[in-house]
Amino acid sequence: MRRTALLALLSIFLAAPALAERLFVHHVNGYTLDGQGRLRRFDALLVDAAGKVIATGSEAALAPRAGQARVIDGHGRTLLPGLIDAHGHVLGLGLARTEVDLGATHSLAEAQARVKRYAAEHPQAPWILGGGWNQENWRLGRFPTAQELDAAVADRPVWLSRIDGHAGWANGAAMRAAGIDRHTPDPAGGHIERDAQGNPTGVFVDAATALIAAKVPAPTPAQLAAALDSALAELASVGLTGVGDAGIDLATYRLYRQYADAGRLSVRIDAMIHGTGADFDAIAADGPLVGYADDRLNVRTVKLFADGALGSRGAALLEPYADDPGNRGLLFIAPADLVAMMGKAFDRGYQVAVHAIGDRANREVLDAYAAAYRTHPQASALRNRIEHAQIVTAADRPRFVDLGLIASMQPTHATSDMHMAELRLGPARLAEAYAWRSFLQQGTRIAGGSDFPVESPNPFFGLHAAVTRQDHQGQPPGGWLPEQRMTLVEALRAFTLDAAYAAHDEAVRGTLEPGKWADFILVDRDLFAIPASALWQTRVLETWLGGRRVYAAPADTQTPAH
């Protein structure tokens, strides 16, 4: 055998996760849900040598069973099951950390300054890339323009995604590189913003973003690996032990397999294949990938898109936008094509998850599932999903139950969107938006997520938003549409047991029950003993995956909060 091959095998062996001994974690303030979602308390946790839970309970009861286990003193800190984000974008998070971040800008001038500074700091970058902008926070009352971006950088192409990922802002050089002019037609499912003379103004919505994105240099393999390393580290630092990656391509699939084989996935990833095209055909050649590398990687889901986003007015609505009466948003896929895509995924045994935000899009997706089930009745058992399900009419909501669908929802979307949503929808339609309580009351499972990097990956922000329906400044008083709040137990369930259920993984994770992976976190406060307003301030002190610590906070942040 060649020396390089021997070294590769040795590196995999050394990196492979394995426990040489059992683990006994005691002196903790422990919480977990059971399989029925009921809250349980404990003060000790016993883990076997494979990294799975033997038992939780009292220290007095478990200590005699610990034997020669490695002992971890929790110092009275709160221990929770590892949290799961059912909908994020892993490489998107890692790449975003190396690009221009406009997420916290409060004016166009501030955004321009950031872009200009970044360009000066990266003189060799052929394109200036980034995102996070939100014209609503700039009080513009309109989209920004290419000319305004040229004022910051004119000598190189600039391409910046809107915070929702469903629109992009280009400068003049980027539009010239893509050959965009007044004669460029709007693509199906997309829209080019134009001035009164029909000239593109620099903002591209939904499918139109591909006109510019196709010209952006693809990340190198080294850049993708660095992005994955960055994302994995950040996810572990906020207490996430599982993530649903909502839309991967073939290159990302191969990278995840490499990391899983080398024991380098410090977060369990449930990857969704983007679409049913050539990448799906290649990835699905051997059928769904389930429980790979000790349940570190699943690839058993297909991600489809029905519409755009509310902030960029691409969400497909039954009635016109309240602040744009001539616009009802964009549908991406003809109904017959959507049914055909679902059928192709179902034929190969894949779960389907469809992005749908507007009430028209949600209705189309519900209709498509109903039609697809008529030819694929067995597919109703696949726990199919609607991602976001932000605006669903009262008449359509019960169809989630009828069709056995999971509502994969992101609580921080409500608190981020609340100032914009009423402008887009008007007060009457708000009653049908971000309706977590209504879904729970009818028995629909909610898989909690964030849609990072659209929102922060910090799941405690999501728990806070779910329980309070307020921002971090406590606004609005009493919460936005407070009748739709979750209880803390319901919110915890959405980010643990039901997120695991949505990935068909509730038998191996999501709670700290015997036989499941010992995925857990230690945090600096007791979530059930503090005001709900303080939930978002929770800090993660340690993150453990399969009985191995994958994150420890710096020593100066280890003092518990009071």
Image: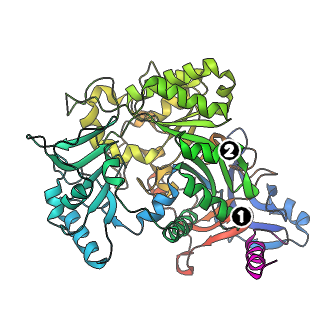
Q: Which residue is mark 1?
A: 261
Q: Secondary structure at mark 1?
A: helix
Label number found at residue 225: none
Vertical comparison of 90 with 413: above or below:
below
Q: Secondary structure at mark 2?
A: helix
- Percent across and percent down for residue 118 are 28, 73
Q: Which of 71 and 2 lies nearest the eye of the viewer?
A: 2
The residues colored magenta run 1-20
- Percent across and percent down for residue 458 are 49, 58
Q: Is residue 13 magenta?
A: yes
Q: Quadrant of residue 292?
A: bottom right
Question: Residue shown at 61%/71% (left/top)?
Answer: 551
Disc 1 and disc 2: Cα gap in Å? 19 Å
Q: Which residue is mark 2?
A: 285
Q: Is residue 275 visible?
A: yes
Q: The residue under label 1 is which amino acid type? A: Asp
